[in-house]
Image (tube, grey):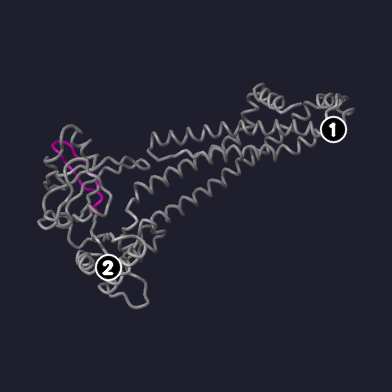
Amino acid sequence: MNTAEAIRIALHSLWANKLRSVLTLLGIVIGIAAVIAVVTFVSGLNAYVAEQVFNLGADVFIVNKVPNVITNVDQWLEMQKRKNLEMDDYKAVREACRYCEYVGVSASYGNGQIRYEDQSSSDTGVRGWTWTMNYIYDLETVAGRSFVPSDDDNASSVVIIGYDIYDKLMGGVGDPIGKEIRIDGQLYRVIGLGKKEGKVLGQSRDNWVALPITTWMRQYGSHQNIRIWGKAYGIGALLDSAMDETRAILRARRHDALGKPDSFEIDTNDTFIGLWSSLSGNFFLVMIVIASVSLLVGGIVIMNIMLVSVTERTREIGIRKALGARRNDVLRQFLIESCTMALVGGIIGILLGIGVAKAVTFFVGMPSEIRLWAVLAGLFMAAIVGIFFGVYPARRAAMLDPIAALRFEL
C-alpha cells in the first residue's frame, strides 16, 4: 500500500465515523488551538508593547518614586514610605545634568470629570506635562499644537485632548481647536488633539487630557508625586552617564546614605520591555504545559482508537499479509493513518486558535499577530503526537500472524 492510499483510508475512516472522529481529535484540537492562540496573543502583545506602549526611545529614562511593577502588598506599603519626587528635584536635575539633552516632568490624576456643553465623562486621565515632554515622549498631535515654554511659565489654562474626548464628548465633528471644556470644574481652551491610539485589553488609550504641569499643580496640588523624564544626548555610554548623573543628584537631594539603595527607581525602555517579556514568557510556559496535557490526552485517545481499528481490521491485515505485504508495510500503513488523524486535528486546532484570537481582537481589542513558525510548529507537534502514540497499535498490527488473522472473527 502506498502513502496516498493509507492517507485516503485514514480520511475515509474519519468521515465514516464522524462522532467518534470528533471525540478522537478533541484533545489534539484543544491542545493545538491553545498553543496557537497563546502564541498569537503573546506575539501581538509583544509587538504592540514594544511599538506603542513603551515606545520611549532608546535614549530616554524615567525616574519614579516606586517601581513600575509591585508584586505584593508589603512591598507596596514599604514603597509608600519614600518621599515624593517634587518639582525642586526636577529643577535640580534639569540644571545639573550635563548629559541630558532634555528633562521633563509628568504627573497624573486618574478620575477627572470632563464636560463639554451637555456631555460629560468621569473617568478621564488628567496628565500634567512640561513643554519639554514634546521632545521626550512620542505623542503626535493631529490638530493644533503642543505645549510651549510660555504655557509652563504662565500656568496657561490650555489643554491637549485625547481622541476619545473629541469623538465622544465633542461629537467628532468639526475643528476642536479653540473650543472650551471643563476639567473638574475649571475652564480650559483646547489647543491640540492627540492621535488616535486605540484600545489594549478593552481599555482605551485615548481617554485623557493633558495640562501644562504648572496648571496641573495649581488644580491638583504642588506636592503631588511626579515622574522625571530624561533624554540623553545619545544611547549607550551617553545614556548611562545621564542616568548616573541624575542618580547622584537625587541621592544627594534625598539624603540617601552611602551604601544604601536608592530611594527612587530609574527605568529605561529596555527595563519595561524586559519586564513584559519575562511576564509574557512565564504566561506562555504555563499555557504550553496546559496544552501539553491536552495533547497527551489526545494522543492516548488516538492510540485507543487505533487499537480498536486494528481489532476491527484484523482479517484485512491477514489478507494483505497473505497477498505479500511485509511487516514494515503494515507498520507504515497504520503509522500514516495515525499521523493523518493527528494532522487533521492539528489543522482544525490551528484554524480554531487563529479564529478565537482574531475574535478576541475584534471584540476586546487585544492585539494579536499570526506567526508562521507557530503554525508550522503546531503541525509538527500534531504529527509527532500521531506518530508517537501510533507506534504501539501499528506494531501490534504488523506482528499479527496472517493465518490467525484470517481466522479471526469479531
Q: Quadrant of the C terminus?
A: top right
Q: Say which residue label 1 marks.
A: 400
Horizontal relation, residue 60 to residue 376: left or right: left
Q: Say which residue label 2 marks.
A: 83
Reply yes or no: does residue 318 show up in magenta: no
Q: Which residues are magenta?
A: 108-124
45 up-or-down from 310: above or below: below
Q: Quadrant of the N terminus?
A: top right
Rendered image quadrant of residue 376: top right
Q: Secondary structure at mark 1?
A: loop
Horizontal relation, residue 375 to residue 323: left or right: left
Reply yes or no: does residue 111 show up in magenta: yes
Horizontal relation, residue 155 to residue 137: left or right: left
276 up-or-down from 63: above or below: above
Name the residue: 42% across, 47% down: 46
Q: Main secondary structure of the magenta part?
A: strand
- Tell us which disc is closer to us: 2 or 1: 1
Q: Secondary structure at mark 2?
A: loop
Image location (x, y in percent) of residue 188: 12, 46
Asked whether the beta carbons under mark 2 and mark 1 sit within 8 Å of each other, the answer is: no
Rendered image quadrant of residue 250: bottom left
**Foreground pick, 20 / 272:** 272
Image location (x, y in percent) of residue 10: 69, 27
Q: Amino acid at mark 1?
A: Leu
**Foreground pick, 403 / 233:** 233
Q: Residue furthest bottom?
A: 258
Name the residue: 42% across, 36% down: 360
Q: Residue furthest right?
A: 403
Using the image, tell me which numbered label, if any, was put on residue 100.
none
121 up-or-down from 225: above or below: above
Q: Amino acid at mark 2?
A: Lys
* N-terminal-most mark, 2 or 1: 2
